[in-house]
Image (cartoon, rainbow, N blue to C red):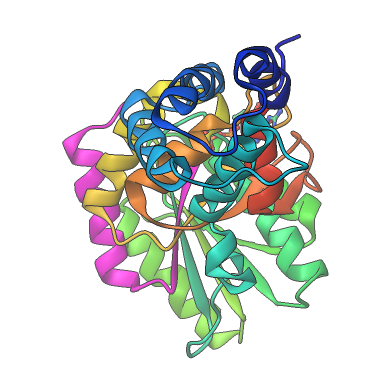
Amino acid sequence: MLDNLTQRLAKVVKTIRGEARLTETNTAEMLREVRLALLEADVALPVVKSFIGKVREKAVGKEVMDSLSPGQALVGVVQQELSQIMGADLGEKASQLNFATQPPAIILMAGLQGVGKTTTVGKLARYLKQEKKKKVLTVSTDVYRPAAIKQLETVSGQSGVDFYGSDASEPIQIAKAALDHAKRHFYDVLIVDTAGRLGIDEQMMQEISGLHKTLSPIETLFVVDAMLGQDAINVAKSFNDALPLTGIVLTKLDGDSRGGAALSVRHITGKPVKFVGVSEKLDGLEEFDPVRMANRILG
Ligand code: GDP
């Protein structure tokens, strides 16, 4: 088991007990431990550097109250800063889906293949139906993988929502037909699953950005796998450059990962994490909680 941050800092702090404020010197050693903890949590290196810089700025010169050791005081600064970056200061609204549009509210899903996009569509459909009482339609524009379309049909059925099947061979045609169907049958929400690729490629980005232009979705969610680790920032950057994302879904948080990708992706895109995936099952979707995420990353 890895030590958590408080335990790590406690080891360093023995030497500097009794100091009344956080200084350049006592902070530097402790920040090395914070840096290590973040790297172990798989936060991307440039993000770690920027975060450490911010914490140093806020910490140095801070009075350590009588009851607190310098270690505890620094943990406090780190936790607060991390929770804030994760979205605590944006308020609860940041993690809510936006429905302020003429129905159907369109949710476009983006992300690489295998990250859990289709499963997340099923989870989201179930959540919107059960928790938000929405009438939901799903559609897949993955014309390259018939199995992916079938998978969406299956999870939609399991979630008790309708699935739009199409014989069209072109993603934009399928999306337009689904939107037309959703309008005519008074659906509240249309969730559009898109083709993923194993890596970023130009054609994939052009295709999804074309879908975005056609549909003008109110939500464009970037789905990313918590296990992606250091690579998460490159993938997030490509999607964020190609599409006006409105939020992030971090999947597979039930694995071993500490979830450092959440911090990396939040930092790179500036967009709020809205949901986390916590199991393979369709009830395994939770609304994002920034403070809990910060604590998890810190171990
Ligand atoms: P897609 O290619 O992005 O559409 O990915 P899929 O939805 O097909 O999911 C890929 C694999 O990840 C499947 O085996 C899913 O069951 C699994 N998966 C998706 N979300 C989660 C999650 O939150 N936790 C776990 N443990 N597995 C997940």
Residue 130 to residue 251: above or below: below
Residue 102 to residue 109: above or below: below
Between 237 and 123, the residue placed more toward the observer is 237
Q: Which residues are magenta?
A: 199-224
Quarter of the image where the C terminus is located: top right
The outermost residue toward the top is 1
Q: Is residue 130 left or right of residue 165?
A: right
Tell me where residue 124 sits by quadrant. Answer: bottom right
Tell me where residue 281 sits by quadrant. Answer: top right
Q: Is residue 14 visible?
A: yes
Where is residue 31 shown, x and y percent of the image? 48, 25
Between 166 and 263, the residue placed more toward the observer is 263
Q: Is residue 111 visible?
A: no
Residue 252 to residue 217: above or below: above
Quarter of the image where the N terminus is located: top right
Between 64 and 53, the residue placed more toward the observer is 64
Looking at the image, in which quadrant does ligand 1 appear? top right
Residue at the image point whose x is 53% and y is 25% from the top: 34
Residue at the image point whose x is 28% and y is 56% from the top: 243
Residue at the image point whose x is 66% and y is 25% from the top: 5
Residue at the image point whose x is 64% and y is 21% from the top: 9
Between 215 and 85, the residue placed more toward the observer is 85
Where is residue 149 shown, x and y percent of the image? 54, 43
Where is residue 22 shown, x and y percent of the image? 51, 36
Label total for image: 0
Where is residue 21 shown, x and y percent of the image? 54, 39
**Residue 124 shown in magenta:** no
**Residue 202 shown in magenta:** yes
